[in-house]
Amino acid sequence: MKMKKILALTCAAAMVFGLAACGSAAADTTAADTTGAETEETADLSGTISMAGSTSMEKLANAVAESFMAKYPGVTVTAEFTGSSAGIEAVTAGSVDIGNSSRALKDEEKEAGAVENIVAIDGIAVVTDPANTVSGLTKDQLISVYKGEVKSWSELGGEDAPIVVIGREAGSGTRGAFEELLELEDACAYASELDSTGAVIAKVAATPGAIGYVSLDALDDTVKAFALDGVEATAENIKAGNYFLSRPFVMATKGEISEQSEAVQELFKYLASDEGKQVISGVGLITVD
């Protein structure tokens, strides 16, 4: 009788162990199948994606291209930085897949077939050389400076030195957004009009009394950013709606995203994912919820 009980328990234990082992093997097989499917999907995606446009979006475009190609080795992403208007013209002409614009699209651009896909929010920082003793401006003061109505820093509480007004070239998304937000279209008295964000930073840093505007994510310690209406130029203040100089970063397509190639569609899915949002945040931009 005792022997029968021992045999029964032994068999039961063996059955339980067997089932557990089978369950474990099944789980391992499922995990392997899932991983294999993901790997196969990643390997299967191939093609090219071409972008052109805003110089202010250079850091974002390069970061997205690098991380996307690492995830999808079969896809090649290229980017040129020709200015927002040129990027929109290129995408509507069909010479690139994506036109990068650091401003909202104009009605005529939309009528030409460009679709506005906002991928991030950027702030525009107003900068000066680090030696400038003025640390903040009101909105009205900023407008007066760019109109040429205020010509010396002494009128703003600073040294008796001329204000050198620096801006971007016509067609720049940064310039378009800056002038539109301040209602300064065709009203700015520029001493210099430069063709890239980097050129503005270099010019302002090297010119005593200079003032310029640049994308927030391009800020470095060679220049000093003004507080505007008492609010510092930070992502937190832009998210809170307290900083008045902010703009969309647009990756425009000719037609809806659903009409694009598989690779382009996947790029937009990637930008909306947690992984893509980390890339956007990593270059100092604000993600779109």
Image (cartoon, helix red, strand yellow):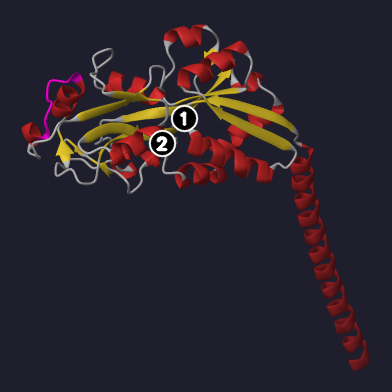
For the residues labelled 1 and 2, say whether their Cβ atoms are less than 8 Å apart. yes
User: In the rendered structure, which amino acid carries the disc numbered 1?
Assistant: Thr
* 66 versus 11 height, above or below: above
Which stretch appears magenta? 147-153
Prevailing SS of the magenta stretch: loop
* 10 versus 108 height, above or below: below
Quadrant containing the N terminus is bottom right
User: In the rendered structure, which amino acid carries the disc numbered 2?
Assistant: Gly
Question: Looking at the image, can residue 115 be seen?
Answer: no
Q: Position of residue 261 (x, y in %)?
A: 69, 24
Density class for disc 2 (Cα within 10 Å; few <14, some 14-19, many ≥20) is some
Label 2: element kind: helix
Q: Position of residue 57 (x, y in %)?
A: 47, 32
Q: Which residue is mark 1?
A: 55
Which of the 4 image quarters holds residue 248?
top left
Density class for disc 1 (Cα within 10 Å; few <14, some 14-19, many ≥20) is many
Q: Nearer the viewer, residue 143 or 42?
A: 143
Q: Is residue 118 magenta?
A: no
| Residue 198, numbered circle | 2
